[in-house]
Image (cartoon, helix red, strand yellow):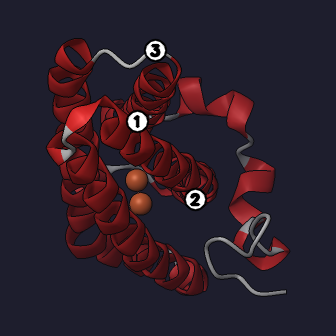
């Protein structure tokens, strides 16, 4: 089974040994402030993606250019920009430090790093479709561009859900098992 983002349906068992000891229902009480903040960023990304998708769908159903453009531009800029920043912090700060705490998870952090590259390409493609909506001339062109943006945002959502869930299953149990000091 390929473990590439877009192909895998979950993590292999050898990356989930800490999750068995620290399942999701223990995270709220087990994580410290760093872990809880990090997890809340993921919640915010899921919410922003859902809102962006809903804006694109709403526009396709009932085109209202004046209302749609500023909302869509602000939401798209926020989601795409904040995600890139989040990935940079994880790749350069979080993952190298966390991997030192548990070398058996190094393969997992390599996988998550590769996810970020795949997501980067998808984010760029999504930004292209979003810009096309904002530049479109006339309602018909804007609606057709919004249909393409909707498909791109939907695809991004699928990849993002997989990545965030798998990342949480690796990182949250590790933070609970070994503490959060290394991320401060
Ligand atoms: Fe990530
Ligand atoms: Fe993350």
Tell me the element at label 1: helix
Q: Nearer the viewer, residue 109 or 66?
A: 66
Q: Position of residue 65 (x, y in %)?
A: 24, 21
Left or right: residue 94 versus residue 45 is left
User: Can residue 90 be seen in the rendering of this structure?
Assistant: yes
Query: Which of disc 3 and disc 2 is earlier in sequence?
Result: 3
Real-space CA distance between mark 3 and mark 1, rounded to the nearest whole angstrom:
9 Å
Could you say which disc has been placed on residue 62 in the image? 3
Distance between the Cα atoms at labels 2 and 3?
Answer: 27 Å
Q: Is mark 2 within 8 Å of ligand 1?
A: no
Say which element carries label 2.
Answer: helix
Q: Tell me, yes or no, whether the two marked residues, 3 and 1, touch with CB atoms within 8 Å.
A: no
User: What residue is at 61 percent from the left and 84 percent from the top?
Assistant: 104
Q: Residue at image x 61%, y 73%?
A: 5
Is disc 1 in contact with disc 2, using a CB cutoff of under 8 Å?
Answer: no
Mark 3 element type: loop
CA neighbours of label 3 inside 10 A, class few (<14), some (14 to 19), many (20+):
few
Q: Quadrant of residue 11?
A: bottom right
Q: Residues within 10 Å of mark 2 (few under 14, many from 20)?
A: some
- Residue that label 1 marks: 143
- Are the residues flagged by discs 2 and 3 in contact, CB closer than 8 Å? no
The numbered disc on residue 173 is: none
Tell me the residue that label 2 is attached to.
159
Residue found 25% across the figure and 52% down from its top: 132
Q: CA distance from mark 1 to mark 2?
A: 25 Å
**Residue 6 falls in which quadrant of the image?**
bottom right
Q: Residue at x 20, y 51 (%)?
A: 131
Closest to the camera, between mark 2 and mark 3, is 3
Q: State left or right for residue 78 relative to residue 141.
A: left
- Disc 3 residue: CB within 8 Å of ligand 2: no
């Amino acid at each position: 089974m390929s473990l590439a983002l877009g192909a895998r349906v979950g993590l292999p068992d050898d990356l989930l040994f800490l999750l068995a000891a620290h399942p999701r229902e223990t995270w709220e009480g087990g994580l410290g402030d760093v872990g809880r903040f990090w997890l809340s960023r993921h919640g915010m990304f899921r919410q922003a993606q859902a809102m962006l998708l809903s804006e694109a769908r709403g526009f396709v159903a009932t085109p209202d250019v004046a209302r749609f453009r500023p909302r869509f531009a602000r939401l798209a800029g926020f989601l795409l920009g904040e995600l890139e920043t989040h990935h940079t912090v994880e790749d350069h700060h979080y993952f190298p430090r966390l991997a030192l705490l548990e070398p058996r998870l190094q393969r997992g952090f390599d996988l998550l790093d590769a996810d970020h590259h795949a997501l980067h390409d998808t984010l760029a493609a999504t930004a292209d479709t979003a810009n096309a909506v904002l530049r479109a001339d006339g309602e018909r062109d804007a609606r057709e561009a919004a249909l393409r943006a909707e498909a791109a945002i939907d695809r991004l959502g699928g990849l993002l859900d997989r990545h965030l869930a798998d990342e949480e299953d690796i990182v949250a149990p590790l933070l609970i098992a070994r503490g959060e000091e290394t991320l401060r």
